[in-house]
Amino acid sequence: MSAVDKAFHGLRHMIATGRLSAGGRIPPEGELCEELGVSRGSLREAVRMLAALGVIEPRHGSGTYVSQLRPEDIIGSLSLTLELLPLSGLLEVYEIRRVLESHVAAQAAARSTPETVRELFALIEAMDATDDPTEASDLDHRFHAEIATAAGNPALASLLSVFRARSRKYQIFTLPEGEQMRRKSDEDHRVLATAIADRDPRAAAGAAEAHVAQTERWLRAFMPPMEEDSAGAD
């Protein structure tokens, strides 16, 4: 095990066991280096690694602290690795997405409010009105994020956001068949929003699952290229 790994796992163990608590300041470098048996350079590299994962927060002029360790923040750091997946790997993730999107849609329907319904239909109208693929992709992302937020579980919303961010890197609506696929996607959005407005969890769950499954079929059929700024799958 390298010195950096030793420092990383040592700090991780201190946090996992509660010795270093959420929001608390970590001990001075000298103390940690002595206890862990590593150099300052190795310790600093371990701190940088944990900061990238959302576990530690260096604060300029104040010190280094354990983050609040909110589940949604920790899960959000999965984007660092999930965004490396090739399309073949992403397609494996779609089975998870179908289950989770179905669940949050059902929860959103059960908790439906007039404000949520208005926002969903406003986003649908905006998607219908735009001819800009990039804007449509952004609106699509906001539509699904609104449903996840309405479901009331920030950790689930964060995980789905990570999944969707990777999906959006793959072009489908700019393919020759893209306009037809986009119309179908917009129809699916309307069916899903209507089920949520009707406070019908079963219908909402079925609509969400069917929508994600359709996107998965398109990705498998067309195997679109990945682009940095894409009007991609939702």
Image (tube, rainbow, N blue to C red):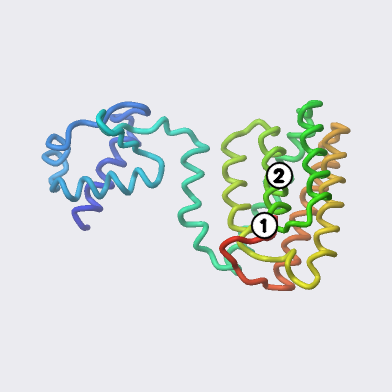
State the SS at label 1: helix
Percent x, y for residue 25?
A: 28, 28
Rendered image: mark on residue 95: 1
Q: How many labels does the image show?
A: 2
Quadrant (top left/top right/bottom left/bottom right) for the N terminus: bottom left
The residue lying toward the viewer, choosing from 24 and 145, is 145
Question: Looking at the rendering, which quadrant does residue 223 occupy?
Answer: bottom right
Percent x, y for residue 208?
A: 78, 48
Whole-number angstrom distance, CA of label 2 to CA of label 1: 17 Å
54 above or below 24? below
Disc 2 versus disc 1: nearer the observer: 2
87 above or below 30? below
Mark before the other along the chain sequence, 2 or 1: 1
Rendered image: mark on residue 144: 2
Q: Is residue 9 left or right of residue 90?
A: left
The amino acid on which the numbered mark 2 sits, given as a three-letter code, is His
Percent x, y for residue 185?
A: 81, 55
